Amino acid sequence: MCGIFGYVGKRPEAAAIVLEGLKRLDYRGYDSWGIAALSDNKITIEKQIGKIANVKSNFQLSTLNSQLAIGHTRWATTGAVTQVNAHPHFSTDQSFILAQNGIVENYKELKEQLLKKGHTFHSETDTEVIVRLIEEKLKNDKDLQKAISHAFAELKGRNTIILATKDGQIFAARNGSPLVVGINEQTKDFYISSDTLSFAHDANKFVIIDNGTILRLNHSLKIFDIKSGRERPYKMEDVTIDSGKIDKEGFDHFMLKEIFEAPFVLNQLLKQDEKAYMQLASALKKARNVYTIGSGGAGVAAAQCAYYLRHFGRINAVSLIGADSAEYLELLSKDDIIIAISQSGETADVLEILEPAKKMGVTIASFVNMPGSMITRMSDYKFMSESGAEICVMSTKTFDAQVAFGYLLSKAVSGKLAEGKKNLRYLSDTIATYLMDKKNHETIKKIAKKLSQEEHIFLLGKSQNFHIIQEGMVKIIEAAYIHGHALPSGDLKHYVITLMEPGVPVIIAISNDEVKNDVINAVNEVKLRGAYVIGLAEENMSNFDYYLPIPQTDETSALMHLIPLQLLSYYMSIELGNDVDKPRNIAKSVTVK
């Protein structure tokens, strides 16, 4: 969660540079923001409640002549959303200022100890505890780097901090939450950030900062081991992520643009190295157990990947949700494979499983969108979605890519990768045609208007469509703030049928597959009790009150169903006047537990 960004270099508009960097990071949190800039050996700060995306270039610090600045965009964890709680936080003598991405799990205990030693707190945040702890360490050791290292070592949880001093230095330390440094080799400018995307338009190289290290930056970069204090070498990598298309390109919202990019991301997968798929497929066939894992929408995608591996690959794949997987740790062995699905590659509760699994010798494969991420770096088999920047907090095109990856991998396991690629190519063309048809949008808009007035929405599907309608539920909840309940259609009569009554909305996804008649039976059951049915299917049926025609794509039918479900949630958000690209209370990259 949260985003941190820093700049040091020769350009005199450091605060404005940090402002633009934070705008590219606000998918990580947008409750509040703050920027601190150094000028004439004095640190000046501005912080406000609300989205930094709304801030214009003529903000308070924009006229300041400064070559060093740090900033933070916040997703509140400890402390309410107030200006006082916004980061960064000053030291008592204002000699340094600090921001954090993470949670200090033992901050209450540390705060108690510091209060007893006479320290004063102005905010409710765990971040200010770090500031005061550093001040306490400075009483015994005037070396700031050592004081930061000693304080950081006492923090429990996944944390990254960035600190700027009035003598022109930036320090940053990492334990869990992501941290990268961008370097412009020509101008000698340095950028410190939570992801490479935020500085990709300015830097040509980047350095991944490892866990357990602290960096010092003024006009050169040095990295040290936190425990030993010894300097560590680092490797510079090329910035390859495309930052040239980070705009709406004529669309009203990023979400709509990214839904329209589904054919692009599918074609990106089709270009990938077949040998990599076949190598992982071979390993999967030899594995004792196969697990797929993800969280949030990526958890739903992981479940769909496991379905494909069972259905097409005939592999006993089990899907796990990151935060609820600890009981599996004792069951793992070096003969198992975990396939991790993540947009950011930094999902905290997935890493909580992968890190001990890695030490146990478990083979790890991953499918990630963000280059240089922790999950990618610890994987034995690395796959990138190559979907480009996804700005909308609600994932659409990267979810499409995740599910399509699972489909292709399962076809590789079955020895039919060429057939899978042919089917995916046809799906890509079909989606492109579907999205360009205005009649499809008008139909969905009418249904979105009707559903926007509801308090509860039920979604039913079976087999290949069950996890897809789960994702439909996720999108409705995220976009419309309306309660959704997705369930397997066969489970309807076991409990949810008690809620079926006149006027209840039910969305049902049907494919021309072996379970089609079972799902039709569920349609009949809810209709008998007065529910109104919205059918996603390849043909209209008499019991549909509303019909969303879906082109026939055979094995990839579930992937085709994703598109109208994404559009439905998009148009519901518009109808309700919600912030489409930045839904309330959520962030795109969940890097804390």
Image (cartoon, rainbow, N blue to C red):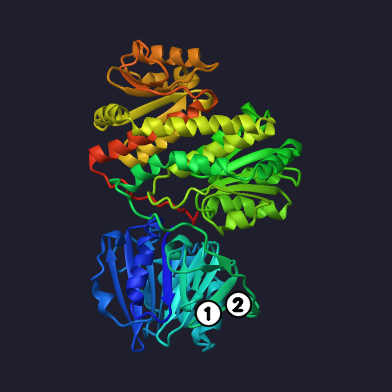
Identify which residue, 555 or 497, lies in the foreground.
555
Drawn side of residue 342 relative to residue 569, left or right: right
Q: How many C-alpha atoms fall within 10 Å of the one at disc 2: few (<14), some, or many (≥20)? A: many
- Disc 2 designates what residue? 224
The quadrant in which residue 68 appears is: bottom left
Q: Which residue is mark 1?
A: 216
Mark before the other along the chain sequence, 1 or 2: 1
Label 1 packing within 10 angstroms: few (<14), some (14-19), many (20+): some
> Measured along the vertical axis of the image, is residue 539 above or below residue 575?
above
Instruction: List x then y, in percent, for residue 210.
Output: 59, 67
In the rendered structure, are the residues bearing label 1 and label 2 in contact, judged by CB atoms less than 8 Å apart? Answer: yes
- In what quadrant of the picture does the N terminus appear? bottom left
Residue at image point 41% right, 20% down: 537
**Residue 156 percent location from the top left of the image:** 54, 65
Res. 321 visible in picture: no
Q: Which amino acid does the dot numbered 1 rest on?
A: Arg
